Amino acid sequence: MGLRGVVVVALAAWAGWLLFRGVVRKKVPWVGLAIIALPLVVFGYTERQWVSAEKEFSSVAKTVEPVAPGVHCQRLGESFTYAGAELGHVEFDENGLPTGPAWLSYETCQNLAAYWRSSAAQKTGPPIEQVIAVHVLSHESYHLAGIGTESLAECDAMQRDARTAQVLGASQLQGLQLANTYWQSVYPDMPSDYTTRDCVSGGRLDKTPGDNLWP
């Protein structure tokens, strides 16, 4: 449970105690309850939104690997103590098997949620930050499926991005456009361990060679 969840529980407990004491004393402190109610509703709503987004992203990851443990979205409090720059990662054990859920940064989850909740029209030409966030979800999903090599996970993920976007509400055309944007605008600038010459249309890593569709 994140800090926001703790606040919600604490406020609810406080409100419950005030109500109980008021009933016992036959004098309910309605003003005090009203003051507590506002932040309780606000924090409760945002917490529910965050949890529902995390659940949705986990379900997307499971379209790649049905038995995957899902996705954990970094909380705002966690981001204050995190010194890394990764947008996402999956831990592997000594046997090369993924352990635990895929971890996504606070920024990545914010951008993913913004894309998921955007309108149909807004999914045409989304900001590059949202394009990258959708791809990060695809990429980490392949790590959850047991692919540890970054260049392989990256190539598989690019060919999955259109489908990931569709699961998050995009049309088929919008999904294809998003995948193409990543291929043209982001992939060429990725570190060398994330790229390979085999990741091209008709190349060794093309999952559907001969269909004239890339990525």
Image (spheres, helix red, strand yellow):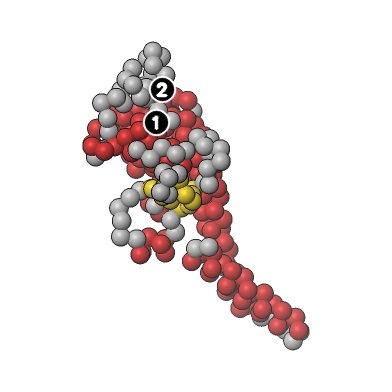
Specify whether residue 109 is in view.
no
> Is the Cβ of the residue at disc 2 closer than 8 Å to that at disc 1?
yes
The 10 Å Cα crowd at callout 1, few under 14, some 14 to 19, many 20 or more, is: many
Q: Quadrant of the C terminus?
A: top left
**19 or 194, nearer to the observer:** 194
Q: Residue furthest bottom?
A: 25
86 relative to 176 in the view: left or right: left
- Which residue is painted at 40% across and 54% down in the image? 106
> Which residue is found at the position 35% from the left and 64% from the top?
81
Question: Which is nearer the N-term, disc 2 or disc 1?
Answer: 1
In the rendering, at what x and y percent does residue 18 appear?
Answer: 66, 79
Residue 152 drawn above or below residue 117: above
Vertical relation: 97 (above or below) 37:
above
Q: Amino acid at mark 1?
A: Asp
Residue 148 at x, y percent in the picture: 38, 40
Identified by mark 2, the residue type is: Lys
Tag on residue 156? 1
